[in-house]
Amino acid sequence: MTRERIIAPEESGDETEFHKGLRPQSLDEYIGQPGTVERLKIAIEATKARGESLDHLLFHGPPGLGKTTLAYIIALELGRDINLTSGPALERPADMMPFLVNAAEGDIIFIDEIHRLPRVVEEFLYSAMEDFVVNFTLDKGMYSKPLPFQLKKFTLIGATTRPAMLTRPLRDRFGIQQHLDFYDESDLTTIARRSAHILETKIEAEGARELARRARGTPRIVNRLLRRVRDYAQVRADGVITEQVAGEALRLEGIDELGLDRLDELMLRVIKDTYGGGPVGSAALAATMNEEVDTLEDVVEPYLLKIGFLARTPQGRRITRRAYEHLGEPPPPDAITPQPSLLDEAFATDAKARERKRENKRGDGRAEGGP
Ligand code: ADE
């Protein structure tokens, strides 16, 4: 079933042009993901100094967080061309050939949804990525034999919401792997203000914060909300996006104060009412909701997990105490209390460790520079 969803993180229709106009053009302009930005700056600077091509790079994380934007920025910063394609568009090795053959030294080939690459194309890429050679068979006839074809040293940038679905040999061929995580409210507020400025729309600080609070940690969603709220402000208010205007406009769009919409609520309610709070497997859940499994797993679930409304257990999904409270119902005694996912925790710990390291370094620097 297809449903128009204002908070769907994927782009649709005329939106692509709209988002393109708001895209940052350099890493310095990029807001959020400080660890990734810093590592990319170092890799780009070192690559340029050596006159080499950048290592193949894999971005993983939920949709709408900037994987494509970063690929464009990398091409701009390197001064190279970029060509875009996606896993589902590449059905056979032959579909990959134009991208490989046309790439000049250092150019970028971007494959979105790389986890949906058919196995034959994936295997075809191994030697292209590793040795910059492909063995291409022109004909399937009796006398056909593979012709080796030397490629220029291109850079492959892959983007995926499901890194676990890539085969190990493909994953291992990416020298740089970066996870993008949901943005915090402060970064999203800054993005909303920056976008409003580009669109020449007046927005108050609290108006921007209201958009950020309801954007599910996702820049693409904050920009989409801004677009809707801008219309509302123009028609129903005096054109200025205040906290109240943003709140009214988004309520009208069916988005609650946490950024959840009808589909999120449906998922929580189906787990609660049909499956007694869970556990339930995603296939059963998707069938009951008349939705695609991929939509639930890639688009709906990640944010519900992030805010602790949903827990994934070996037996399936369960809704948490917090979700019952949000639905306005008393949680049953056995309702689980949300735990940050192991992945979140690993990244948080990682980020904290890096931050501590940086602080220690700064401390050392001061000590050295001191009297
Ligand atoms: N627009 C969308 N994502 C952005 C980001 N991370 N920084 C600045 N502007 C953006």
Image: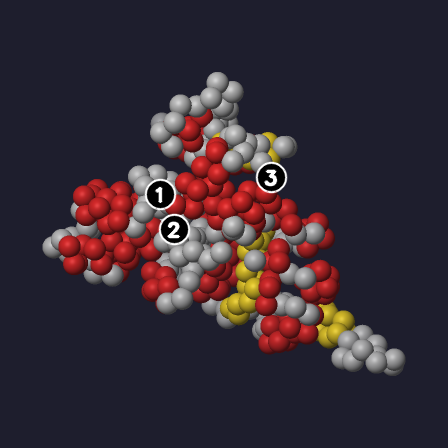
Q: CA distance from mark 2 to mark 3?
A: 24 Å
Could you tell me the amino acid type at mark 1?
Gly
Earlier sequence position, callout 2 versus callout 1: 2
Quarter of the picture containing the C terminus is top left
Residue at image position (68%, 62%) is 118
Mark number displayed over residue 100: none
Q: CA distance from mark 3 to mark 1?
A: 24 Å
The residue to which callout 3 is attached is: 281
Displayed quadrant of residue 173:
bottom right
- Mark 2 and mark 3 in contact? Answer it, CB < 8 Å: no
Q: Does ligand 1 reach within 8 Å of label 3's beta carbon?
A: no
- Mark 1 is surrounded, within 10 Å at the Cα level, by few (under 14), some (14 to 19) or many (20 or more) other residues, namely many
Mark number displayed over residue 7: 2
Displayed quadrant of residue 243:
top left
The residue to which callout 1 is attached is: 259
Earlier sequence position, callout 2 versus callout 3: 2
What secondary structure is marked by label 3? loop
Q: Nearer the viewer, mark 2 or mark 3?
A: 3
Residue at image position (51%, 36%) is 274
What secondary structure is marked by label 2? loop
In this view of the protein, which residue sits in the foreground, 336 or 224?
336
Query: Residue 208, percent across and down?
Result: 25, 46
Residue at image position (35%, 43%) is 259
